[in-house]
Image: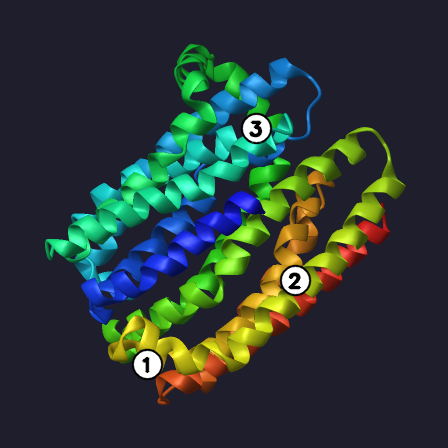
């Protein structure tokens, strides 16, 4: 959490500068781009990076690495082509971007996919000291490029370039020594071996990719709906409020989830089921307490100071923070626990959550039709909280049955 907290402080400290260098329209366009590449990168490795935690045979780990790399390269190019097409046709709110943004998408998705592979290898080895620094590295790279580009008035190209640099910033730290050997391994692996490996671990893409797609659609719908109905300016206000409100979950929750994933996998591989359950229960209690500590200032203090800190153009965004923060607090409780379904290979249970959050979000979108930004945010936040309640029930049920 120490490295993640430092990354979070960097982001918060520079946000007032970013919001003064870029307009709500710039931030709204960037947020649409981030939403797209987040959806694509979630499937970049075809979820085979999650399988790296499970096998004891190191030869099988090597084959999974090669399979993950080829999957990443393929998905990266396809995602770039898709973004160019959708932005050209002005579909699904992506019309706020130019088709050339597809070139950035290829590089960003590829960088994030490779990062996921090497991150999983580090997690398998319990190398948490390395993982503790990558959040700060990515955030620092992103911030430097944003501020430099913004000071020259480069607008959205500077923001896209910052995302590209950040996507590759951690590669050297995570897998600098392994990158060349891993690429060689991928190039020398036979297609027959890769196909056999994919079949042995087919449960990961078969169950997790549909689940991830549904998750990302549910996460993308709010921003894309706001951009489509209310314009890129409203999308920018929503994006900044969301970015600020969900920082604890994005950084601290992710860091805690990494450690839980590694330790829980160790217990399951060793057959220590009781220890795995105790770990789950301790973490659940601690994340709930952390969520409460984070939520209180978000409800009472942050909305009053938002306009002063980030500029009067963003005053309205501060009024959105309490609702989004409540949603983010519920995410902070469940998201660090979510890797347990992967480790237990019970990914099919997650479909219960996926279906419920899609349904709740769809109801919120329909109910918010014709209303203002604030009403959209309230309804969408309630839908997100309801989905996380269902997710917690699913996770708790899976742990009790091991």
* Residue located beneath label 2 in the image: 290
Q: Residue at x 69, y 47 (%)?
A: 341
- Badge 1 crowding class, 10 Å Cα cut-off, few under 14, some 14 to 19, many 20 or more, is some
SS type, badge 3:
helix
Q: Earlier in the sequence, mark 1 or mark 2?
A: 2
Q: Earlier in the sequence, mark 3 or mark 2?
A: 3
Q: Residue at x 48, y 37 (%)?
A: 133
The vertical placement of 135 against 58, above or below, is: below
CA–CA distance in space, label 3 to label 2? 26 Å
- Badge 2 crowding class, 10 Å Cα cut-off, few under 14, some 14 to 19, many 20 or more, is some
Residue 125 image offset from top left, x and y in percent: 63, 25
Pointers 3 and 2 in contact (C-beta within 8 Å): no
* Residue located beneath label 1 in the image: 315
Q: Residue at x 20, y 58 (%)?
A: 97
Image quarter where the C terminus lies is top right
SS type, badge 1:
helix
Pointers 1 and 2 in contact (C-beta within 8 Å): no
Residue 301 image offset from top left, x and y in percent: 49, 79
Q: Is residue 341 left or right of residue 384?
A: right
Determine if residue 20 is in view: yes
The vertical placement of 9 against 165, above or below, is: below
Mark number, residue 122: 3
Front residue (pair 378, 14):
14
Closer to viewer: mark 3 or mark 2: 2
Q: Earlier in the sequence, mark 1 or mark 3?
A: 3
SS type, badge 2:
helix
């Amino acid at each position: 959490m120490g490295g993640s907290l430092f990354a979070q402080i960097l982001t918060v400290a520079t946000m007032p500068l970013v919001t003064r260098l870029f307009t709500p329209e710039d931030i709204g366009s960037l947020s649409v781009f981030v939403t797209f590449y987040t959806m694509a990168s979630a499937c970049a490795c075809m979820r085979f990076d999650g399988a790296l935690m499970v096998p004891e045979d190191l030869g099988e780990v090597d084959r999974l690495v090669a399979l993950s790399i080829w999957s990443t390269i393929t998905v990266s190019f396809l995602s770039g082509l898709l973004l160019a097409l959708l932005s050209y046709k002005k579909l699904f709110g992506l019309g706020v971007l130019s088709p050339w943004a597809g070139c950035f998408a290829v590089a960003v998705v590829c960088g994030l996919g490779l990062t996921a592979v090497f991150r999983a290898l580090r997690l398998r080895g319990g190398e948490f000291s390395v993982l503790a620094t990558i959040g700060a590295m990515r955030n620092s790279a992103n911030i430097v490029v944003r501020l430099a580009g913004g000071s020259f008035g480069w607008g959205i190209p500077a923001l896209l370039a910052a995302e590209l640099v950040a996507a590759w910033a951690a590669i050297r730290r995570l897998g600098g020594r392994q990158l060349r050997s891993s690429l060689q391994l991928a190039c020398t692996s036979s297609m027959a071996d890769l196909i056999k490996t994919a079949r042995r671990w087919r449960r990961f893409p078969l169950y997790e990719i549909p689940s991830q797609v549904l998750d990302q659609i549910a996460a993308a719908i709010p921003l894309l709906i706001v951009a489509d109905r209310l314009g890129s300016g409203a999308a920018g206000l929503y994006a900044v409020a969301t970015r600020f409100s969900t920082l604890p979950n994005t950084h601290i929750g992710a860091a805690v989830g990494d450690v839980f994933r590694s330790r829980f996998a160790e217990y399951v591989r060793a057959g220590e089921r009781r220890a795995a359950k105790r770990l789950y229960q301790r973490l659940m209690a601690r994340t709930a307490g952390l969520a409460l500590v984070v939520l209180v200032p978000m409800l009472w203090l942050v909305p009053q100071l938002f306009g002063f800190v980030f500029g009067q153009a963003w005053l309205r965004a501060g009024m959105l923070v309490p609702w989004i923060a409540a949603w983010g607090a519920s995410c902070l409780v469940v998201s660090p626990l979510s890797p347990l379904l992967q480790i237990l290979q019970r990914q099919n249970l997650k479909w219960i959550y996926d279906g419920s959050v899609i349904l709740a979000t769809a109801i919120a979108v329909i109910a918010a039709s014709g209303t203002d930004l604030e009403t959209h945010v309230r309804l969408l936040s309630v839908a997100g909280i309801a989905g996380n309640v269902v997710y917690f029930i699913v996770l708790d049920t899976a742990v009790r049955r091991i």
